[in-house]
Amino acid sequence: MAKTILNMKDIEKEYFGNKVLKNVNITVNEGEIHALVGENGAGKSTLMNILFGMPVIHNTGGFEGEIEFEGHKNIISSPKQAMEKGIGMVHQEFMLLPGFTIMENIKLNREPTHHNLISRVLGNKMKSLDIKTMRDDSRKSLDKLGIDLDELLPVAGLPIGYMQFVEIAREIDKTNIKLLVLR
């Protein structure tokens, strides 16, 4: 029997008196793929914003209901906390830096480093980027998706479909990813 990774129970949310989610329940087991389908304004993005701890939810009065992630009740109060728990999200609006390469976008804020002569004297803040590891890790993530793009290509000018794959590659490159949300 598959392990339940996510259980959202009786989720309700209203914006300024307008109830946008009412008694929503969703369970996701390990290895499953789910799709939320509905017309614009149906609440799909709101539900995912609740799961990811987006500030817009907390700044508009929070929500009601319960979130269990990996069998534990959770209050996910920020995207940082969601990421620490292993929840990744690829947003509809790209979060890529066009002047960076595919590799740099995949490894952004998680760059492996190594000591050099200067860092041995002046400390860890002077370490060098480990470009070989960055390149190898990026290549592995792209290969998992079956994408044959040079990881040293700049993101600027890539077709939108490839940009989406770079976003997904960044999420699956994370070592603790347990749940990936595409919105």
Image (cartoon, helix red, strand yellow):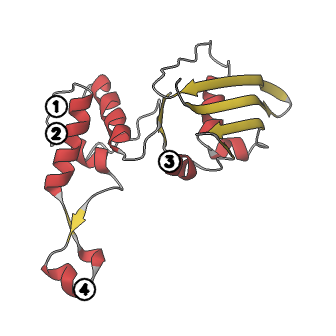
Give the residue at mark 1.
149
Alpha carbon distance from label 1 to label 2? 8 Å
Q: Is 59 situated left or right of 84 in this image?
A: right
Tell me the mark number nearer the camera, choosing from 2 and 3: 3
Q: Which residue is mark 4?
A: 122
> Earlier along the polypeptide chain: callout 4 or callout 3?
3
Q: Secondary structure at mark 4?
A: helix
Amino acid type at circle 4 is Leu
Q: CA distance from mark 4 to mark 3?
A: 32 Å
Q: Secondary structure at mark 3?
A: helix
Residue at 48% across, 20% down: 33
Instruction: Tell me which numbered mark, 2 or 4, is placed earlier along the sequence.
Output: 4
Is mark 1 in CB contact (under 8 Å) with mark 2? yes
Label 1 vs 4, first from the N-terminus: 4
- Alpha carbon of mark 2 to alpha carbon of mark 4: how far? 33 Å
Q: Which residue is mark 2?
A: 153
Q: Considering only order in the chain, which callout, 3 or 2, is on the residue closer to the N terminus?
A: 3
177 and 38: which one is in front?
177
Task: Name above or below for residue 65 compared with residue 27.
Answer: below
**Mark 3 belongs to which amino acid?**
Met
Q: Nearer the viewer, mark 2 or mark 4?
A: 4
Tag in front: 1 or 2 = 1
Crowding around mark 4 (Cα neighbors within 10 Å: few <14, some 14 to 19, many 20+) is few
Q: CA distance from mark 2 to mark 3?
A: 27 Å
Name which residue lies at 66% across and 38% down.
68
**How busy is the neighbourhood of tag 2: few (under 14 within 10 Å), some, or many (20 plus)?**
some
Left or right side of 106 for 88:
right
